[in-house]
Image (cartoon, rainbow, N blue to C red):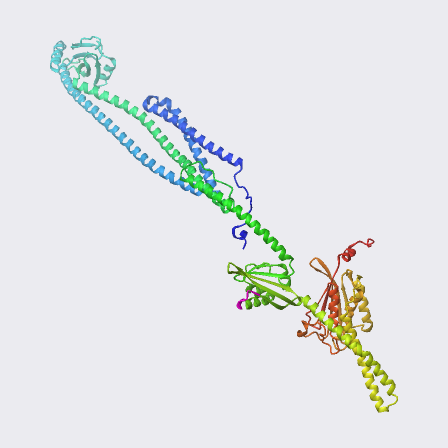
Amino acid sequence: MSLQSMSGPLSEKQPDKLLPSDSRQRGKFRRAISTTLAVTGTITTGIAFVLLAVAIHNPDTLGDLFPHIVVTSTIGLTILFSNISLNLYRLIRRLSAGESGAKLHFRFVGIFVSLALIPILIISLFTTQILRQQDSGEHEIMNALDGSRALYKTALNERKKRIIENLYQLGSTISNTPQSMVDILLEDAMEDSKAMEFALYDFSGNQLSISSLLSEPGLVPTPLDPLIVNQIKQGLDYHKVQGHEDLGQILHLVIPVHNYYSEGGESRILSTYFTIPKQLESGQEKINDAVMRNKKRLYLERQRGTVHNIAFIMILLLSLLSALWFAFYSTRRLTAPISELAKGTQDVASGIYNKPISHVSHDDLGFLVQSFNDMMLNLEHTHKSLYRSQQLIEHQNARLEGILSHLSSGVLVLDSQRRLERINSAACQILDSKIINTSGIPIGVIAQHYPLVSPLVNALTDHIQAGEKEWSVSLEITTSRGVRSLFCRGSCLIENEQLRGFVIVFDDVTDLVSAQKNAAWSEVARRLAHEIKNPLTPIQLSADRLRHKYLKQMGEEDGAVLDRATTTIVQQVSTLKKMVQAFSDYARVPKLQITTVSPSSLLNGVVDLYCAQYPDHITLQIEGELLDVEGDADRLRQILNNMIKNGLESSGTEKAAHVTVTAKMADQGTTKTLQIKICDNGRGIDEAMRSQIFDPYATTKPKGTGLGLAIVKRIVEEHNGQIKLLDSDLGSCFELSLPIHHKSANRHLQPDGEQG
């Protein structure tokens, strides 16, 4: 397993994910705007508080200052509220975007706001309760003053009532007294009642009699006030308290007096003045002064209360908004390093180590940020070291892959648990299996899905159980290309006296084995041909001499015996000569005469030759246009003759035999090939013979030499082609594949008239 698979892809220069300069400038600009708004709102609200302080000290100025207080406080609080709303909007947007640190920021804001709101609410409740208690005390004072005033009025009314009763008694006396005695009566009444004045008027307001201690003539006018006269005429009494510079307050009473002394006499009006006792007068003055002072104080208190309420509301709102803004500000200051640490952690997890976190504080968070930056620096150095190591490993792996890919030998590398780690393309080609993408899978499991790997697994298991560190073995596997011979070598990978894995190298030695067999059989055929050919001619000549010399001298019976014997000898010698010629042809490797051969012409020529003798027993099928091949026309014709002849002879009877020849172009990777299939309806080939059908002297015919297919295979291989036996339900079917060289292909691709 490589470093890349364990820790992700490494690169020497990680992508820089630092915020661009314009983003940082926008962040600074937003923070500057937020701070400016906070300072502006605080200053404006401070101005409002100064105006409130002036109004509290001098409540009379509240009316003039109130609009300014409202405007400045509204502007200040609006600015603070806008700033808080802007911060809240940014926080919500960060939460929606899922930015790191946003949830922590939101949580801290909630905690700080809760901590600020609880004391503010408690203070607000207590302040409201205190103000209410002060208002109730003021009402009690006013109630006491109102009671004093009521008591004063009651005492005054009682005195007025007694005076009025005495006055009516005096009026009754005057009603029965002649006018000449009225003055004396009034003087006596003044002495008895301690009045300041008694005067008698007619209903026109003219003064009739008077007895007065008042020294100011202008105080009581000679004629009676017409308004008082009209009120008396309506049957109503008149009483009024008046102020006097010397006497203080005096009570003026006026009542009607009937004239019972003379019949038909006109009713009159009795007017009197009484002084109010000093106790009542001073009490009244004190009460009035207290009432006036209290009213003024209440007015001022109301004004001051209004100012206090405004100040209280402003302080409450300012405290609330300030707490919110301070919560956002302090939380931002507190969570900024934490958010940066979270982002830095994500960057480290993503493999970015060149993004240090900026910090300005010197507290524990600053120490934590500095430690994180030191860790990132160490990780970056470690990362670069790992990158260089990985580059070296990748370079070595690339070289190893290049070497393995160009090896003709198959290579399997297993770990200590027998899991596949590496396999080259040659191994897949030799094993005829696509097992490239099975890295990390136990080789036993791979063998279950790819049976051709089983012989290797069995050999590996046997030698491991035997305790062998190095071993070699020859195997045979059956692929789509037939039986292939493999030579395998295995070794244990030991490192630090511990088993690290296994390596298996195997080669397809089928062609080598076949070449060795061919060489051996060629040598056998050459020697047989040489050893047999030499005595054949003397034997044939001796038989002919015996025949010519003794046939005529013998009797008929002996002559017949000699004739049959010599004829048999000659025939068998002729057969042996043919066999010797076949041995010679197999042993001899003539030089190929390479020319450009047209497959269509070659096939038609050979098939026409056999069709003349077997018109209904051969079928030729050419699919599409066949490209020319480079080869020896005579040797290729020999192949076709041999294959068609074998097909016709395979059924046992020439009448039932049928051979089908099919030719077409095919692609094998980047190479075009000519494919020729020759199928018959004969007896077919036994399963036991299929693996050695192309070996010399292997034949299914009673009189065959077994060299025909061996010669065909040699000729095909001399043309860099392949021949294989295909599976067939009826008879046997052979497929020849001959490569098309580039010159032939390019020549066929040229337009008409451009051929060389």
How many numbered circles are shown? 0
Q: Is residue 522 magenta?
A: no
For the residue pair 732 and 475, the one nearer the viewer reads as 475
For the residue pair 367 and 194, the one nearer the viewer reads as 367
Instruction: Identify which residue is drawn at 52% across, 36% down.
Output: 23
For the residue pair 124 and 446, the one nearer the viewer reads as 446
Query: Residue 717: percent from the left, percent from the top?
Result: 73, 65
Is residue 396 shown to the viewer in this render?
Answer: yes
Q: Is 432 displayed left or right of 696 in the figure?
A: left
Q: Is 689 displayed left or right of 312 in the figure?
A: right
In the picture, the quarter occupied by the N terminus is: bottom right
Q: Quadrant of residue 327?
A: top left
Q: Is residue 521 above or below residue 310?
A: below
Q: Is 199 displayed left or right of 622 in the figure?
A: left
Q: Is residue 159 above or below residue 20?
A: above
Q: Is residue 461 above or below residue 178?
A: below
Query: Residue 268: percent from the left, percent from the top?
Result: 18, 13
In the picture, the quarter occupied by the C terminus is: bottom right
Q: Is residue 684 above or below residue 593?
A: below
Instruction: Look at the image and give the residue range highlighted in magenta.
Output: 464-470
Instruction: Identify which residue is drawn at 34% across, 38% down.
Output: 118
Query: Residue 14: percent from the left, percent from the top?
Result: 54, 44
Q: Quadrant of residue 606?
A: bottom right
Is residue 680 shown to the viewer in this render?
Answer: no
For the residue pair 272 and 445, the one nearer the viewer reads as 445
